[in-house]
Amino acid sequence: MPCLYITTNVKLDGVDKAPIFSEATKAVSTIIGKPEHFVMVIIKGEADIQFNGNKDGAVYAEIVSMGGINKEVKRNLIEKLGTIMDDKLCVPRTRFFLKVYDTTAFSSSKL
């Protein structure tokens, strides 16, 4: 089950989050190759985030998936999710950071 956790310093009161949830869910599902009903999206607004020395709109996001992650998938996730953040939250892609975890990258024998 992929989980996308979006944290932003943007005030979300009055923002229609439904399109963010639906577009992010579809993007993660399509790019990683998992069914939409397995994708979890969490959005937290008004976080204390400073980037490049200022508190202009910024987004930090993390995605965790059990498999399905490679370099191309990472690139596509950054591109598509960055576009969604720009379109829906007016946060430029240059102020969007995505951390990607693949939980299958570590086996118990390596720990």
Image: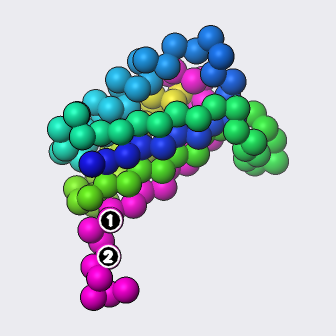
Q: Amino acid at mark 2?
A: Phe
* 82 is higher (above) or lower (below) than 71: above
Q: Quadrant location of residue 31?
A: top left
What residue is at 75 percent from the left and 33 percent from the top? 56
Q: Of the residues shown, which amino acid type is indicated by label 1? A: Thr
* Residue 24: image location, x then y, percent: 37, 31
- Note whether residue 31 is visible: yes
- Span colored in magenta: 87-111
- Which residue occupies the foreground of this view, 56 or 67? 67
Q: Local crowd at mark 1 within 10 Å, few (<14), some, or many (≥20)?
A: some
| Residue contact between numbered discs 1 and 2, judged by CB atoms under 8 Å | yes
Residue 95 is left or right of residue 3, and the answer is right
Q: Which residue is mark 1?
A: 103
Of 66 and 68, nearer the camera is 66
* Residue at figure coordinates x 45%, y 31% from the top left: 83
Q: Is residue 53 left or right of residue 96?
A: right
Helix, strand or loop status at disc 2: loop
**Residue 50 appears in which quarter of the rendering?**
top right
Residue lying at the far right of the rendered structure: 53
Dividing the picture into quarters, in which one does residue 92 lie?
Answer: top right
* Placement of the C terminus among the 4 image quadrants: bottom left
Does the magenta run of residues contain 90? yes
Question: Which residue bears the numbered disc 2?
Answer: 106
